[in-house]
Amino acid sequence: MKFFIDTANLDQIKEAQELGVLDGVTTNPSLMAKEGITGKDNILKHYVDICNIVDGDVSAEVVATEFSEMVKEGEELAELHEQIVVKVPMIKDGVKALKYFSDNGIRTNCTLVFSPGQALLAAKAGATYVSPFLGRLDDISTDGLNLIAEIRLIYDNYDFDTQILAASIRHTMHVIDCAKLGADVMTGPLSSIDGLLKHPLTDIGLAKFLEDYKKGNS
């Protein structure tokens, strides 16, 4: 399973990268705004700054909703850096754009996916990644993890190459559950990755080891 961090915060990206397990970054306009990154030039520069920190894929989202504008914007994003993956929304013109980008060697991430049918269309159009938002489904009392399982079954049935990128991860157990279900990638906050480190028995055991060492070596 690949670990992506879902943020535009450079310090958090650096921290995740230094941990040694980071495979990429996902961003969106909301995350950019949260960090105070506004204006086209500043946003494009920020994408490059992220690429210079991480070794893996960096999803950069188009804001256009019409096919020709999506293509124009996506091609500009793809030219920024070889690590850029163009993030496209799951709408009709978005599916058209996914197919265009796929045919022209530009990698894509289909975002805002909430149903197996949407995921099937994205794979048919050649998306590199599909991003089902399981946390947002959980927020409205719908089983987000079931969506991951359904997409995994469909993709395995037809040997689609599209990778399932479990998005809107809320906490560490989402990561574990998605790993059990066979999601190819998870993307979430740094806390969801850091949480995997924690177990009280690890803390107790380490404290005991250090205590015994001091007794015999003081």
Image: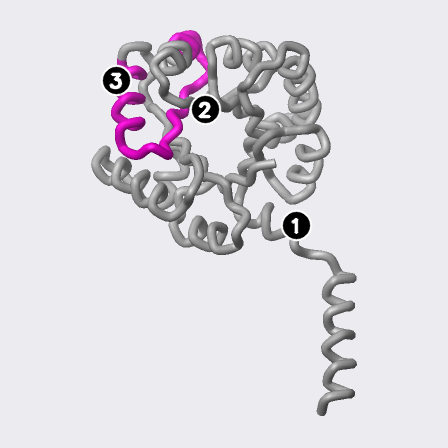
Residue 214 at what x, y percent from top left?
73, 85
**CA separation, marks 1 and 2?**
26 Å
The disc, 1 or 2, on the residue closer to the chain's N-terminal end is 2
- Crowding at dot 2, Cα within 10 Å, few <14 / some 14-19 / many 20+, comes out as many
**At 77% across and 87% down in the image, what residue appears?**
215
**Magenta stretch, overall SS:** helix
Which residue does the image show at 36% across and 18% down from the upper left? 105
- Which one is in front, 173 or 86? 86
Q: Which residue is mark 1?
A: 196
Amino acid type indicated by mark 3 = Lys
Amino acid beneath label 2 = Asn
Lower sequence index among marks 3 and 2: 3
- The residue to which callout 2 is attached is 109
Residue range (magenta): 69-96
Position of the C terminus, as image quadrant, is bottom right
Would residue 81 be counted in the magenta stretch? yes
Q: Secondary structure at mark 1?
A: helix
Tell me the residue at 74%/81% (across/down).
213
